[in-house]
Amino acid sequence: MADEDADEPTVPIVCEACETTSRVPLSTLRESIERHNEQRHDGEDIARVDPVLADALADAVAADLGLYDAE
């Protein structure tokens, strides 16, 4: 099972308020962010997926859906 965990992609999360960054397995991303925000920021959405990655992913999805295609 340890080999399976090593193969799982990780996602960078950042918390500017805490001045921290970390990487968490994709399968626990939502729970990790929610737990951090609950424990450290009274549930306020402070920690999040690294904005650079989030923007790149949004661009890739938009391109894949053809939203950037000029008609």
Image (tube, rainbow, N blue to C red):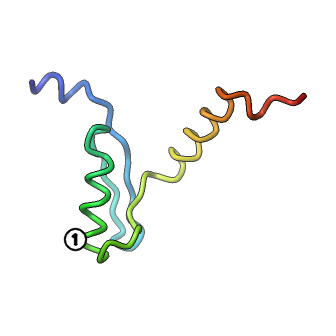
Q: Which residue is mark 1?
A: 39
Tell me which corner region of the image, top left, top right, bottom left or bottom right, holds residue 28: top left
Q: Is residue 21 left or right of residue 6?
A: right
Q: Is residue 52 left or right of residue 68?
A: left
What type is the residue that disc 1 sits on? Gln
Residue 19: percent from the left, percent from the top? 36, 68
Q: Is residue 44 above or below residue 36?
A: below
Residue 17: percent from the left, percent from the top? 38, 73
Query: Closest to the observer: 27 or 21?
Result: 27
Residue 30: percent from the left, percent from the top? 32, 50
Residue visible at 46% across and 52% down? 50
Q: Is residue 63 above or below residue 16?
A: above
Residue visible at 32% across and 31% down? 9
Tell me which corner region of the image, top left, top right, bottom left or bottom right, holds residue 56: top right
Q: Is residue 45 left or right of residue 68?
A: left
Residue 31: percent from the left, percent from the top? 26, 52
Q: Secondary structure at mark 1?
A: helix
Residue visible at 17% across and 23% down? 4
Query: Closest to the observer: 35 or 7?
Result: 35
The quarter of the image holding the C terminus is: top right
